[in-house]
């Protein structure tokens, strides 16, 4: 695709192009050098097999901007109806090229690509609200962030850190089933789940009763969500908080933040409010309906939740 500024937009096709892309992302989106390759934080969209989701803006042979467009199926619990949506992430422009309209050009390209793939809405995460509002994005959904401090009881529940590679497919299926039931959820295959659990600095904790998983949670995700429990499953709010306290004491951590959907049933929210030091409420994401069912897709997203491993 050619623009008036002699820019081209294409997927990376060589190892050198992927390396240059990842260098741009590291320099633009990370304050410090990482002890791992940037692409390891996003194994499904920045690996060689995910090149079709990776869009680079080239000025000659130099990559000056980038964004991922990741098609996903949003599924309704009651009847398994699906809506196709596109997650946008790893958005970056070279510092010397900012303010020149390059990202607006790239976003226009992503929209055309998404429409050709029958995607109904674009979803992204950014603090640049005013910029994305000019492109038609609005805040959608809600999430709660509960602050949980270490108490003075220190009771062990038996939840322990686990290496993800020892888990069976049945374990992973059980973990997904243990997440709170929401009206709409992004589909995730077991293979994708396994790959996402391998993101560096992602700590997995599991509690079993016999061979069966009763509770689990993820803390951290690469350079993001440090000290945040961003994905979890449990039988009840009381058991969830007890497991968090067990982790706080066994690992001598002063506090953790629990991220939850904002539309959880009150039998979850009320105990969490009582057992936490405080909580804040935030929009879940930014979205823009683009297809003929764009408003339906945006409304569906607002009734669901995008869990931590799915955000890019």
Image: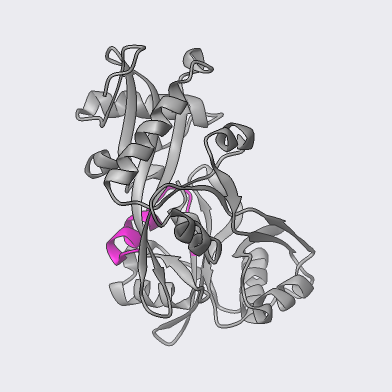
Find residue 172 and report its horizontal and vertical position in percent.
36, 71
The answer to whether residue 55 is above or below residue 7 is below
Find residue 230 and report its horizontal and vertical position in percent.
55, 59
Q: Which residues are magenta?
A: 188-204
In the orientation shown, which residue stands out farthest toward the left?
A: 14
Q: Nearer the viewer, residue 158 or 17?
A: 17
Q: What residue is drawn where x is 60% and y is 34%?
A: 128
Q: Quadrant of the N terminus?
A: top left
Find residue 109 and report its horizontal and vertical position in percent.
35, 32
Quarter of the image where one finds residue 234:
bottom right
Per the image, is 190 magenta?
yes
**In this view of the protein, can residue 203 be seen by the observer?**
no
Q: How many marks?
A: 0
Left or right: 249 in relation to 33: right
The answer to whether residue 239 is above or below residue 135 is below
Q: Nearer the viewer, residue 151 or 66?
A: 66
Q: Nearer the viewer, residue 230 or 120?
A: 120
Per the image, is 72 magenta?
no
Q: What residue is drawn where x is 63% and y is 78%?
A: 265
Find residue 166 and report its horizontal and vertical position in percent.
33, 67
Left or right: 60 in relation to 135: left
Q: What residue is drawn where x is 48% and y is 20%?
A: 101
**In this view of the protein, can residue 114 be seen by the observer?**
yes
Q: What residue is drawn where x is 46% and y is 19%?
A: 94
Left or right: 237 in relation to 120: right
In the orientation shown, which residue stands out farthest toward the front?
A: 292
**What colour scheme does the image use?**
one colour
């Amino acid at each position: 695709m050619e623009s008036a500024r002699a820019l081209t937009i294409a997927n990376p096709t060589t190892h050198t192009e992927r390396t240059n892309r990842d260098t741009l992302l590291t320099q633009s989106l990370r304050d410090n050098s990482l002890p791992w390759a940037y692409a390891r934080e996003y194994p499904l969209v920045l690996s060689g097999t995910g090149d079709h989701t990776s869009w680079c803006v080239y000025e000659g042979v130099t990559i000056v901007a980038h964004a991922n467009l990741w098609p996903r199926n949003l599924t309704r619990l009651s009847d398994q109806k699906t809506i196709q949506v596109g997650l946008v992430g790893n958005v970056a422009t070279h510092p010397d090229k900012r303010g020149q309209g390059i990202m607006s050009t790239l976003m226009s390209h992503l929209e055309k690509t998404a429409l050709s793939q029958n995607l109904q809405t674009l979803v992204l995460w950014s603090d640049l609200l005013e910029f994305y509002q000019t492109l038609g994005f609005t805040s959608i959904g809600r999430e709660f962030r509960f602050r949980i401090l270490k108490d003075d009881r220190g009771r062990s529940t038996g939840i322990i850190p686990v290496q993800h590679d020892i888990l069976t497919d049945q374990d992973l299926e059980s973990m997904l089933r243990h997440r709170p039931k929401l009206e709409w959820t992004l589909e995730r295959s077991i293979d994708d789940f396994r790959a996402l659990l391998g993101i560096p600095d992602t700590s997995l904790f599991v509690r079993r009763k016999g061979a069966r998983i009763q509770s689990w949670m993820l803390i951290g995700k690469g350079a993001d969500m440090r000290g945040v429990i961003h994905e979890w499953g449990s039988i009840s709010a009381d058991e969830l908080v007890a497991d968090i306290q067990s982790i706080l004491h066994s690992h001598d951590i002063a506090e953790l933040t629990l991220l939850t959907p904002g539309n959880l049933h009150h039998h979850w929210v009320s105990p969490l409010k009582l057992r936490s030091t405080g909580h804040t409420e935030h929009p879940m994401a930014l979205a823009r309906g683009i297809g003929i069912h764009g408003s339906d897709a945006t409304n569906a997203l607002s009734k669901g939740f995008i869990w931590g491993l799915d955000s890019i």
